[in-house]
Image (tube, rainbow, N blue to C red):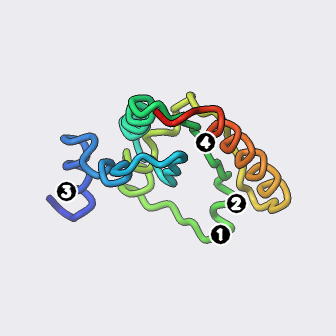
Amino acid sequence: MENAREATDGELQSRTGAYLNSAVQSTPRILIVTDCRRPSDVDYFKLHQEANCRPIMLLRIDSSLTAREQRGFQFKAGIDDAETECALDEFQLWNDRIANDGDNMCLQRALSEIRNKAIELATSFTTP
């Protein structure tokens, strides 16, 4: 293995839930996962939440390449085109999508709407 990133990717591919288990040790009413990298990550959380009779909301935050470059992003081959960065680009089963292209008012409004939806979703389910 050339580097730690490859070792980690290899481990995650061989054991889908290896690093996810720690996130779900307890069963919170609302589980917020800030970063999924692969469809198998999404599947893991969906299965866990459903098994514990908890709702799940899948949210994608998008940003245009222009906005990302304005924030200092520079594409690095072998990193930014790796599975850990691109595997969910074609995933379509998001409950909501938010654009984060630099308009803070729009972003705040969208986040407020998502917060309200999450609260409504969480309160509509009862603890098993």
Q: Which of marks 4 and 2 is in front?
A: 4
Q: How far apart are marks 3 and 1 (CA)?
A: 29 Å
Q: Which of marks 3 and 4 is in front?
A: 4
Q: Distance between the residues labelled 3 and 4?
A: 28 Å
User: Circle 1: is it few (<14), some (14-19), or many (20+) Cα within 10 Å?
Assistant: few
Please state the horizontal and vertical placement of residue 12, each as a whole percent of the image. Answer: 25, 47
Cα–Cα gap, marks 2 and 3: 31 Å
Q: Position of residue 24 (x, y in %)?
A: 37, 48
Crowd band around label 2 with a 10 angstrom C-alpha radius: few (<14), some (14–19), many (20+): few
Amino acid type, label 4: Leu
Please tell me whether mark 1 sits on a helix, a strand or a loop.
Answer: loop
Where on the picture, by quarter, is residue 65?
Answer: bottom right
Sooner in the amino-acid sequence: mark 3 or mark 1:
3
Q: Are discs 1 and 4 less than 8 Å apart at CB? A: no
Question: Farthest residue toward the right?
Answer: 105
Gap in Å between the C-alphas at discs 1 and 4?
A: 22 Å
Mark 1–mark 2 distance (CA, rounded to whole Å): 6 Å
Question: In the rendered view, would you say 41 is above or below 70?
Answer: above
Q: Which residue corresponds to mark 4? A: 59
Mark toward the viewer: 3 or 1: 3
Are the residues flagged by discs 1 and 2 in contact, CB closer than 8 Å?
yes
Pair 1/4: label in front? 4
Q: What residue type is labelled 3?
A: Ala
Q: What element carries label 2?
A: helix
Mark 2 residue type: Ala
| Tag of residue 67 | 2
Residue occupied by mark 3: 7
Q: Which amino acid does label 1 sit on?
A: Arg
Quarter placement of the N terminus: bottom left
Horizontally, residue 34 falls left or right of residue 83, namely right
Q: Mark 1 points at which residue?
A: 71
**Residue at image coords 80%, 62%:** 104
